[in-house]
Image (spheres, rainbow, N blue to C red):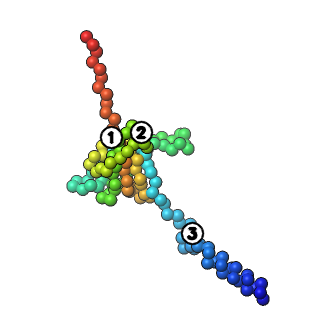
Amino acid sequence: MSWLRNLSVLALALLLTNPADAAGKGKKKKKDHTVQGTIVEVKKDDGKDTGSLVVKVAPGKKDPNATAAEKTFKVSDSTKFEKLAGKKLKKATGTPSKFSEVTKGGSAVLTVNAKDEVSEVKFLAPKKAKKAKKPKK
């Protein structure tokens, strides 16, 4: 009888230590992901700090035949904006900003949830065009 008691204690210990959730199996919660691209269009709602951003998203490295696609992302009141200063997007330092400072043509990194709603926008101002030199007389 001793072995039966040991077996039942072991089974009980395994059941208590295994945090398996039978109701949540098969459903994985999608996490926020980042999207990097160029801002094509900024649509701001009248009188609000909300709207949408159209971003030309670069294709992934895994598929060599993929082309860049334009995607629309929703901007809400809770979206945080950060204007970056520097030459490269990943090494730039940022300062807090507003939706009104986002302009088309600049590079951006968006933190997006599963519903294409933006929680954070980090953007660089578009590059200024160089003036053409006048020919010397």
Q: Quadrant of the N terminus?
A: bottom right
Q: Is residue 31 above or below residue 69?
A: below
Quarter occupied by residue 39:
top left
Front residue of 54/20: it is 20
- At horizontal 43% and vertical 43% (from top left) the residue drawn is 90
- At horizontal 53% and vertical 42% (from top left) the residue drawn is 61
- At horizontal 36% and vertical 50% (from top left) the residue drawn is 121
What is the x, y in percent for residue 74? 35, 54
Q: Quadrant of the C terminus?
A: top left
In the shown orientation, is residue 58 left or right of residue 106? right
For disc 3, the neighbor class at 10 Å (few under 14, some 14 to 19, many from 20) is few
Residue 125 is marked as: 1
Mark 1 vs 2, N-terminal side: 2
In the shown orientation, is residue 7 left or right of residue 102? right
Q: How many angstroms separate mark 2 from mark 3 (CA)? A: 42 Å
Q: In this view, which residue lies farthest toward the left?
A: 47
Q: How many angstroms separate mark 1 from mark 3 (CA)? A: 44 Å
What is the x, y in percent for residue 126? 33, 38
User: Mark 3: which amino acid?
Assistant: Lys
User: Mark 1: which amino acid?
Assistant: Ala
Q: Secondary structure at mark 3?
A: loop
Q: Which residue is mark 3?
A: 25
For disc 2, the neighbor class at 10 Å (few under 14, some 14 to 19, many from 20) is few
What is the x, y in percent for residue 98? 28, 51
**Residue 55 seen in the current view:** no
- At horizontal 54% and vertical 70% (from top left) the residue drawn is 24
For disc 1, the neighbor class at 10 Å (few under 14, some 14 to 19, many from 20) is some
Mark 2 vs 3, N-terminal side: 3
Q: How many angstroms separate mark 1 from mark 2 (CA)? A: 12 Å
Q: Is residue 78 above or below residue 25?
A: above
Q: Secondary structure at mark 2?
A: loop
Q: Which residue is mark 2?
A: 88
